[in-house]
Structure formats: structure tokens, C-alpha cells
Image: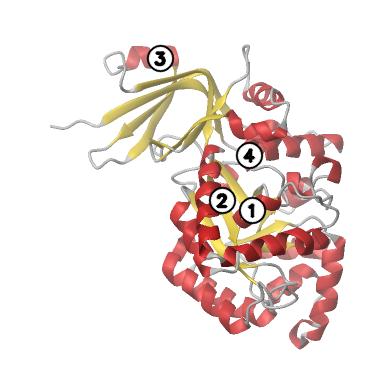
Amino acid sequence: MATRKLTFYRAAILNPKDDKTCEFWADGVLVSETSQKGVSRIKEILPYREACEKYVEDFGNSNLFEFRHGVIVPGFFDMHFHWVQDDVRLMPKDSLLQWLEKYTFPTEAKYAAKSYARSHAKKFFHRLSKAGTLGGACYSSVHDHALDYAMSEVKGDILIGNVLMTMQSPKSLQQTSRDAIKSAQRGMRKYKHRYVLTPRFAIATDPHTMRTTALEANRRKIFKQSHLSETPAEIKYVMELYKQFPAYKSAKSYTEIYHRAGMLGARSLMGHAIHLKPTELKLLKSTKTALVHCPSSNAPLREKGLGSGLFDFRKIERQGIRWALGSDIGGGPFLSMLDVMRSFVQQHGRKGRQQATFVKALYRATLAGAEILEVAHRTGSLDAGKEVNFVVLKGPSGTHKDAEGLLKKLIGQVAKRADFDKQVLATYWQGRTL
């Protein structure tokens, strides 16, 4: 009778549970079990000494992987990023709308060429896996073939959608409403729940297109994403623009415009959400819409961000609104979620927000995203029974008493932000190394 195969991974191990709790093994063993059908699941995590006693007959050279100076964490979830903006993430930034017009839109127009889109998809998603990102929500360009190439290269629980742009956009990217609707319907039919409906934002997507596609997404139980209230200038532009649409003329806020267009809901992700009024928070709560905080993108210009302001997570949490972290590549300058976590703790720390711990940052960069995307029953943490999806990071020297201290040293040991990508020793997805 065939037995199930056991595999052992030894390292320091961190398993986030919530904002304040993270299980910690200074010298642990993650035990995975692979069925006869080749499905790998986490069996348990034990201190190394206990694992030696329990599995003394099972350890062998072929199934024991030792990362003696490594740290195992769940695969990261980046809940808001643009794979087609990788080339502009370090371009000069002064304001959101000018940055889009000067750098982002011309770069995204290049994806009209299939060879360009294919080669960039291959490179980007390989880098993403190397950075340890195995889940999240991603924006593509308007081009159907760019979406196809991205879908063919991506690994993990990452939703992708092509942006819809039907107004106030450069000619090289602007679609007709009919073409945008057809493109979204194609994506929903072809990729089903791997697809995320993606009107770029209220400035670039007309309300008829948003509402028509949102109703279709709701019918198919497909996620939706867009940008909300990133800068005061953007909000002002949206409110003036929507006065021309009779059904939106009386709307009191940016959030209400999205609500009327059918874009809010339990499967909706709104990126940034920095400048919100109390009435908007109540509307987001009542619709169960989730928000994505992009600290490295919204950071001050001197920190290579767009200087948009700082998301107030305390206010969001008081309302009971769900949220997670995102890099917002290319508004965000670096791909690694470790850099996003660093930016989160650093910026909120300057505001005196002591709740912005590294344990909280890890939870919001892993399990919180999985919970929002409704996949936490099988990934996002290292609980028994879940898929073998994890990242091995370079650990800091010395001994560590708890998860917060270990994370603080692990992130603090990196002097150059671009080097966070190099902190990943290995990425495992479904029990296989990428």
C-alpha cells in the first residue's frame, strides 16, 4: 500500500494570525504531506527537537530541506499593482495625474505590440515569484493579448484584469464603450474567477461602461477593482466631470459615484482610499467594500512615492472596513512586499501610530489579502491543511525572542530598498519551488 510522502523544511517560522498575533518558532520544522495524487498540504509545524523525536524514521537527505539562517513566512499577497507599469516605477514623480500623462500612459501604449507584451510578461511575473508574491490583484493594460500573456505567466492566487478606458484618455489607449464592454465580457468568460473587472478609475471609464460590466461581474461573482480618492486633485476632477451625467449630478462624493455605478460590494477592491469623508466610510462599510493601502506609492516624493498622503488605517478599522497592503507598482517604486511593510511601519511610526507594527504589516501583506479574496481556507497562512505556499527569507543574525523582534531585524538589515527583492532564498507554491 502506497504511503503519503512527507517533506520537512527547517528554519525560523512565522505564521500570522491577525493584527496582533503571529506564531513564532525560532527553530521550527514545517511538515508537508503529499498525497498519491500529488497534492501537497501542510501537516503541522513543530519545534525542531520535537520533530526529530516524532519523525526520527522519516528524516532523510532527500526530504529534509534546511534553511538554518532562513525565515519561512506565507507567500505574500499584493492587493494592488500594475504589471504594465514596471518600467515607470522609478520615473520622476510630482503629482498623480501628471505622472500618469507623462510616463504611465505612453508606457502602457507600448503593450499594443504583442512581442513587447509577451516578453515583458515573462520577465515581470518571473520577478514577482522571486520576490515571494503568490497572491493579490493586478491591473493589465487595455489590450486583450497583454492580459492573455499575463495570465499565461502568473503563478499563484493573483487576479488580473485589463483596464477599461473610454474617456479622458490618450487616443492610443482610449476604447469605445462597446469595445470596453466586449473586452471585459471576454475576460470574464475566458478566465472566470481568475479575472477581475478593472475600470481604471472614474475619470477614465464612463458610468455606462462601469455599470454594465459591474452588473455582469456581480452575476458571475467576479471581483471588481479600481482607484478611489488617491489625491484631492483627482477627487475634484471626478466631481466636476460627473456633473455632465444626469444620473450622477447629485452625487455627493467619489465613493457615491462608484456606488451608483455598481462598483462597490463584498467582492470590490478600492485602491488608495486616502481622502475619505465620514459619509464615504459609512457607505464603504455598508457595502462591505475592501480597501488597499499602498504606503510606498503614497509616500513623500523624497521616498520615491507620489506624495498623495497617508491612509488612516485606525479610522478605517473603527468603521470595521476590511483592508490589506499593496505595492501599487509603478506608483510604488519597488516590487517586494517587504519594502511595502517597511514603508507602512516607518510612515505610520512618524505619525505616532504605535499599532503599526511589523506583525500587523505581515498579516496585512499575507493572510488579510487571502481573506479578502476568499481563499484563506487554503492559503495565506501556514495552518495545517493549507496548501504548501511559502517564502524563505534571509534571516538576520543573532537570537530573537518574538515575531516582532525578528521581523524588525529582518527588514532593518536591508540598507538599499532595491535589495529587498534579493532577500528571498526560495518561493514554494503548491509544494514546488519556483
Q: Badge 1: few (under 14), some or many (20 or more) residues near its Cα, within 10 Å? A: many
Of the two numbered discs 3 and 4 on the same chain, state the one appearing first in sequence: 3
Q: Secondary structure at mark 1?
A: strand
- In this view, the residue farthest toward the bottom is 246
At x 50%, y 57%, the residue is 118
Q: Amino acid at mark 2?
A: Gly
Picture coordinates of residue 288 (x, y %)?
Answer: 64, 61
Of the two numbered discs 1 and 4 on the same chain, state the one appearing first in sequence: 1
Q: Secondary structure at mark 3?
A: helix
Of the two numbered discs 1 and 3 on the same chain, state the one appearing first in sequence: 3
Q: Nearer the viewer, residue 186 or 114?
A: 114
Is residue 250 visible in the rendered image? The answer is no
In space, the residues marked 1 and 3 are separated at their CA atoms by: 40 Å
Mark 1 lies on residue:
80
Of the two numbered discs 3 and 2 on the same chain, state the one appearing first in sequence: 3
At x 65%, y 26%, the residue is 407
In space, the residues marked 1 and 2 are separated at their CA atoms by: 7 Å
Q: Could you tell me if the residues under marks 1 and 2 are in contact, i.e. CB atoms within 8 Å?
A: yes
Mark 2 lies on residue:
136
Nearer mark to the viewer, of 3 and 2: 2
Is residue 256 visible in the rendered image? The answer is yes
Q: Amino acid at mark 1?
A: His
Mark 3 lies on residue:
50
